[in-house]
Image: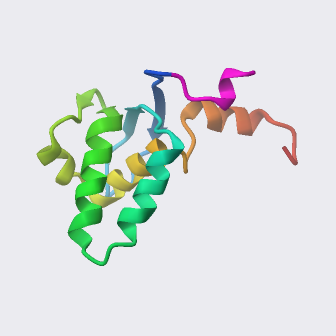
Amino acid sequence: MTSDLFISENQTETRTIPAQPGLHPDLTITYRPALGLERIAYRAKGANPDPNVLNQHEVDLVAKYAVSINGQELRDKDRVARLKPVVRQYLIDLILGYAAADEGRDARAAAPPGV
């Protein structure tokens, strides 16, 4: 078994995202990747017609799995709820494994074509 296939307990990953003028500054995001059950829960909450249900789930998800942005902790749900939507979506994509950490992006860039 390789550790690249599994999420270990207390595993953290980092992603750096260049600034997008008008949207956000340079970001260094540290987070803990979630297991697959969180993806299922996220999809289920998204199917609910009440937008408050998905909003609260997103806030809870980010508060639970995001460690920091630019060194600032994100445990306070009120602060998480006020994140710019684009930044919150980056966090969700990283936490749920829809986007790669810097380590994964580097590995793909170094891989031979077709891999």
Is residue 65 positioned above or below 20 on the image?
above
Q: Residue furthest left?
A: 78
Is 1 on the left-hand or right-hand side of 99? right
Q: Nearer the viewer, residue 67 or 58?
A: 58
In which quadrant of the rendered view does residue 20 lie? bottom left
In which quadrant of the rendered view does residue 97 lie? top right
Q: Is residue 4 magenta?
A: yes
Residue pictured at 73% horizontal, 38% vertical:
109
Q: Is residue 86 magenta?
A: no
Q: Nearer the viewer, residue 17 or 56?
A: 56
Residue pictured at 84% horizontal, 43% vertical:
115
Q: Nearer the viewer, residue 104 or 24?
A: 104
Residue pictured at 38% horizontal, 67% vertical:
46
Q: Nearer the viewer, residue 86 or 50?
A: 50
Q: Percent x, y for residue 108? A: 72, 39
Is 80 on the left-hand or right-hand side of 102? left
Q: Percent x, y for residue 13? A: 48, 28
Q: Quadrant of the N terminus?
A: top right
Is 90 on the left-hand or right-hand side of 3? left
Is residue 37 positioned above or below 76 on the image?
below
* Colour scheme of the rendered structure: rainbow
Q: Residue furthest bottom?
A: 49
In the rendered picture of this protein, how many numbered marks are placed on residues?
0
Q: Percent x, y for residue 42? A: 41, 57
Secondary structure mostly seen in magenta is loop
Residue range of the region highlighted in magenta in the rendering: 1-8
Residue pictured at 63% horizontal, 38% vertical:
105
